[in-house]
Amino acid sequence: MEKPKLLLLFLTLFFVMLGFGIIIPNLAYYAKDIGATTTEIAILMSIYSGMQLLFAPIWGRLSDKHGRKPAILLGLLGNAAALVGFGLAKTYIWLLIARGAAGIASAAVLPSVMAYVADVTTPEERGRGMGLMGAAMGLGFILGPAVGGIMGRHDTPFFVAGGLSLLTFLFALVLLPESLQKDFTGKALEDQHEWISPREIFRQTTLKSPLIPLFLVAFFSTFSFAGLEMTFPLFIEKGWDYGEREMGWMFMFMGAIVVPLQGGLLGRLINWFGERRIILVGLLLNAIGMALLLNAYSFVTLTVYLTIAGIGNQLIRPTNTSWISKQTQIGQGAAIGIMDAFLSLGRILGPIFGGWLYAKEAYPYAVLAGILVIATLCLYIPLRRITDKVAHPL
């Protein structure tokens, strides 16, 4: 395992997700301040993921062809500009434009970093490497809301997050080497991985893939948790008059549990129990935590139940990524980019569905938990059929 490179990637993802996390407690409130409705807030969150859905497979294939580092750098720079633009926006339409641009940019960073990890690790090391990246994302995602919650003004976190993305760009530009050998980023790779449109990826490639159960795991886990994220600020404000500060402390506590699990234990757990068992446990914990939220009656119970859901959700992505990277027979960037597209689809539909349920007062967390349990039962047998070697390419 190339530890210096993994450390650089860890820091890159940490700062990216720290900037992302900083805006979480403020996004819904900031949009609400300019007059956005619950549905418009859901659309605002979904357009970010909509752009990721369209561009993650494209960025993944481009990183296979031209290298990981250029895709990471372009994504970081574009993300910085989009975040600053969001903080400057004073109308809903400009919020939509800035949020969409951030989605396009971020679609370049995450699949490229995960593909980079696959480039520099062996199959035996990959679970640990993906676990470290998951820990970096979790640490940034969890510390970010706590930092953003104490900033006071709702626009300030966007400028801070943009500055962090710009600093990370400079950091990666100077210190991060390219992981692909020159021989694999030229004509030979271009011949092997011809251009495929996003529509063709899903129509001709993804739906025929033996990895479709893993892509569906990515979709359903993200769909449910995105519905939770969309409604949670409104849920705690209505029920307990809590705001961004209290939400930040809840995420801070969740991070204190999740980050050591991802960084120190997840790789070993994958080697001991295998990816399938870890994914199934993660799905069920996610569902249990969301269902328990309906019975929360205090700050402590809200935090504990949110943490249970968060642990389940955070177990899934690095484990799923590790499994896909071991199975795919095309470029790592393309495979992980397709997985990220399914994640993005979940983030598009989850907030819209969750917001609709919340507006109808239809017990959104119970419904989302039920969908997750049904998906787990339906995917149980297909996940068992995935063997260590895939007979057909993705």
Image: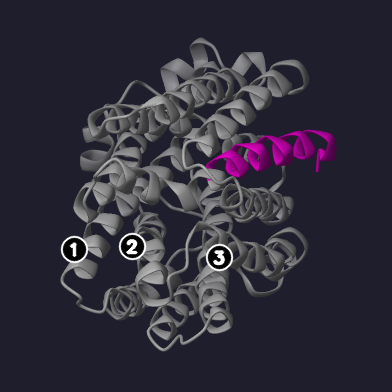
Q: Residue 359: which quarter of the image?
A: bottom left
Residue at 20% x, 75% y is 361
Which residue matches tag 1?
356
Residue position marked by numbered label 3 in the rendering: 246
Q: Is residue 202 visible?
A: yes
Q: Is residue 10 left or right of residue 312?
A: right
Badge 1, how many Cα within 10 Å: few under 14, some, many 20+? some
> How far is disc 2 from disc 3 in space, using C-alphas?
19 Å
Q: CA distance from mark 1 to mark 3?
A: 24 Å
Q: Is residue 270 left or right of residue 337?
A: right
Q: Is residue 251 above or below residue 81?
A: below
Residue 230: % across, % down: 35, 58
Residue appearing at x 67%, y 53% in the figure: 139
Which residues fall within the magenta stretch? 1-20
Residue kind at label 3, given as amino acid type: Glu
Q: Is residue 65 above or below residue 361?
A: above
Element at label 1? helix
Type of residue at label 1? Trp
The local crowd at label 2, few if under 14, some if 14 to 19, many if 20 or more residues have their Cα within 10 Å, is many
